[in-house]
């Protein structure tokens, strides 16, 4: 019996070794239908070309490879153990993948398994008809009119952040900020109020149990091995491991918090309806607060269940704050190199709003800050918070005449077109907000930070408004500098939900005058 088990284990291991060896040493260079496509010269047996991402910290390697080989429809970026990964090199190819054939390319199951524990099961993971229906229902909750109503919320939260950051200090005094942490808590407060209509108190209360639980599930980089195993091994998240129990426990805390808010808001609306009915009236469903949850609760086109709303709100909560915090972190780092741009921004904001940022209450107010808008656009062009998005071919199909076999992974890399010299000029790699003066993109896909086509980021307008307000507020009030001369843009980074500097990042903020 023991001998039989040992033989089984030996055969299993032998088969596994042979299979891995085939994919690494034979398939990539001799069998893959994509073997003749251009590929990076640097790759390792186990990690493939992903060594450029994970070891070399070079998250634009795929984008550069695509830009350098625009004479072919795709380039190859071999993944771990020889997995087929392709990057389209043209706008025409991207248009097929993101528009005309969008539902033939889905989120890979490895991505879905890993991130469902973080983002819930809402729009982010929907595909096909389910995605069409969800997108149609959710889009009005983030319409331009709805987002315009969020501007006072964003402004008010910035002013609250100033009180906490300044902590009684006056003009000329210096403050040290751990930028990623402070911005993450600030944007969490903003998204809490714009999404749920409640304050998360992330800035006011660092020991907030909800914020602590949320931070634990929204930062899987803290448990990278467990996150990877949950992604690649079906059912791994159900194993009775301490890390899995921690993730499940914290996710339940956040989900229960979301569900309670949903129930409270729904019950308030039901009471409003009953009170109106007593007077023989009907509730005006269009008269509501600007937060997203109020839209869902009062939506008469679809009867949302509590679970459905909770899933959608989990997506808004995580995706809506982490990307903004990351973009602002890169903005601070970039602007530390350009004090002259800080001065231009400060001059503009103080000229238009001498009494402070509290006077920004409408889109018309925000649109007066032209340079701030250009600065925001350039930050997002050069530093997209999510530099790589992946799709998997759901079935065999053709893109630009190339047969894409089922299971092939497609990389969509915003820096590819965001820095394409054919679209942005010879200085495409340089940070230059003035390029946006009178700028009209050659093509909508020239700016890929929010993707494009059918699956363009649904929160694009909200993110842009938020970044413009935060940049105006911080640059209007503070001079921002590196804390030590050795700091620069060249630093270790990490990329799971967003691409951001790794660990703490302390910067120096000096109060300039009394404006705020």
Image: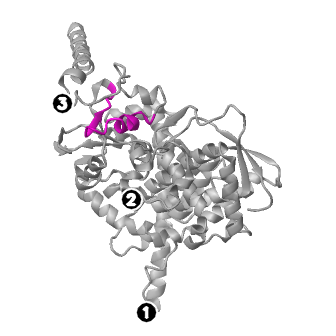
Give the image location of residue 24, x and y in percent: 27, 20
- Look at discs 2 and 3 and give the one toward the viewer: 3
Q: Which residue is mark 1?
A: 280
Q: Nearer the viewer, residue 125 or 42?
A: 42
Q: Which image quarter: residue 2? A: top left
Image marks 2 and 3: residues in contact by CB distance under 8 Å: no
Asked if residue 107 is positioned above or below residue 440 in the image, the reply reads: above
Give the image location of residue 500, x and y in percent: 53, 40
Could you say which disc has been placed on residue 33 in the image?
3
- Look at discs 3 and 1 and give the one toward the viewer: 3
Dot 3 or dot 1: first in sequence order is 3
Image marks 3 and 1: residues in contact by CB distance under 8 Å: no
Give the magenta part as a residue range: 59-80
Image quarter (top left, top right, bottom left or bottom right) of the N terminus: top left
Compute the Cα span from label 2 to label 3: 44 Å
Compute the Cα span from label 1 to label 2: 32 Å
Q: Is residue 181 visible?
A: no
Q: Which residue is mark 2?
A: 307
The residue located at (80%, 61%) in the rendering is 514
Looking at this view, name the residue that lies furthest to the top: 3
Give the image location of residue 443, x and y in percent: 36, 56
The residue located at (27%, 41%) in the rendering is 392
Asked if residue 220 is positioned above or below residue 447 in the image, the reply reads: above
**Does the magenta portion include 70?**
yes
Dot 2 or dot 3: first in sequence order is 3
Q: Which image quarter: residue 35? A: top left
Label count reads 3
Compute the Cα span from label 3 to label 1: 70 Å
Q: Nearer the viewer, residue 210 or 436?
A: 436
Dot 1 or dot 2: first in sequence order is 1
Element under disc 1: loop
Element under disc 3: loop
């Amino acid at each position: 019996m023991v001998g039989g088990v040992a033989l089984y284990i030996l055969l299993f291991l032998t088969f596994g070794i042979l299979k891995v060896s085939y994919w690494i040493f034979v398939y990539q260079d001799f069998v893959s239908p994509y073997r003749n496509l251009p590929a990076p010269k640097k790759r390792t047996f186990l990690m493939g070309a992903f060594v450029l991402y994970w070891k070399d910290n070079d998250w634009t390697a795929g984008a550069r490879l695509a830009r350098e080989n625009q004479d072919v429809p795709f380039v190859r970026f071999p993944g771990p153990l020889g997995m087929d990964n392709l990057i389209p090199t043209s706008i025409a190819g991207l248009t097929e993948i993101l528009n005309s054939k969008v539902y033939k390319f889905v989120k890979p199951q490895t991505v879905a398994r890993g991130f469902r524990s973080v983002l819930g099961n809402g729009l982010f993971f929907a595909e096909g008809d389910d995605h069409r229906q969800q997108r149609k229902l959710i889009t009005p909750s983030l319409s331009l009119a709805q987002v315009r109503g969020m501007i006072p919320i964003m402004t008010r939260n910035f002013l609250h952040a100033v009180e906490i950051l300044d902590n009684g200090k006056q003009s000329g005094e210096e403050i040290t900020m751990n930028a990623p942490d402070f911005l993450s808590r600030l944007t969490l407060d903003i998204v809490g109020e714009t999404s749920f209509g409640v304050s998360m108190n992330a800035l006011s209360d660092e020991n907030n149990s909800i914020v602590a639980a949320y931070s634990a599930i929204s930062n899987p980089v803290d448990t990278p091995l467990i996150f990877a195993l949950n992604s690649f091994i079906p059912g791994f998240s159900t194993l009775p491991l301490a890390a899995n129990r921690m993730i499940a426990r914290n996710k339940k805390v956040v989900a229960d918090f979301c569900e309670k808010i949903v129930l409270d808001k729904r019950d308030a609306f039901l009471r409003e309806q009953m009170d109106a009915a007593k007077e023989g009236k009907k509730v005006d469903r269009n008269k509501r607060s600007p937060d997203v949850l109020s839209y869902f609760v009062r939506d008469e086109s679809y009867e949302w269940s509590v679970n459905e709303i909770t899933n959608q709100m989990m997506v808004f909560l995580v995706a809506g704050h982490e990307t903004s915090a990351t973009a602002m972190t890169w903005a601070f780092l970039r602007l530390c190199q350009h004090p002259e741009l800080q001065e231009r921004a400060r001059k503009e904001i103080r000229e238009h709003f001498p009494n402070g940022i509290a006077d920004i209450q409408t889109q018309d107010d925000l649109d007066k800050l032209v340079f701030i808008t250009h600065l925001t656009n350039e930050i997002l062009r050069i530093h997209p918070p999510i530099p790589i998005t992946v799709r998997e071919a759901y079935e065999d199909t053709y893109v630009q005449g190339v047969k894409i076999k089922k299971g092939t992974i497609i990389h969509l890399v915003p820096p590819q077109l965001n820095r394409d010299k054919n679209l942005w000029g010879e200085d495409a790699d340089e940070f230059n907000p003035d390029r946006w003066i009178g700028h009209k993109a050659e093509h909508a896909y020239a700016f890929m930070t929010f993707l494009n086509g059918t699956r363009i980021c649904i929160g694009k307008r909200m993110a842009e408004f938020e970044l413009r307000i935060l940049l105006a507020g911080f640059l209007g009030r503070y001079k921002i500098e590196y804390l030590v001369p050795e700091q620069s843009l060249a630093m270790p980074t990490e990329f799971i939900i967003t691409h951001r500097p790794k660990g703490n990042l302390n910067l120096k903020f000096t109060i300039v005058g009394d404006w705020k």
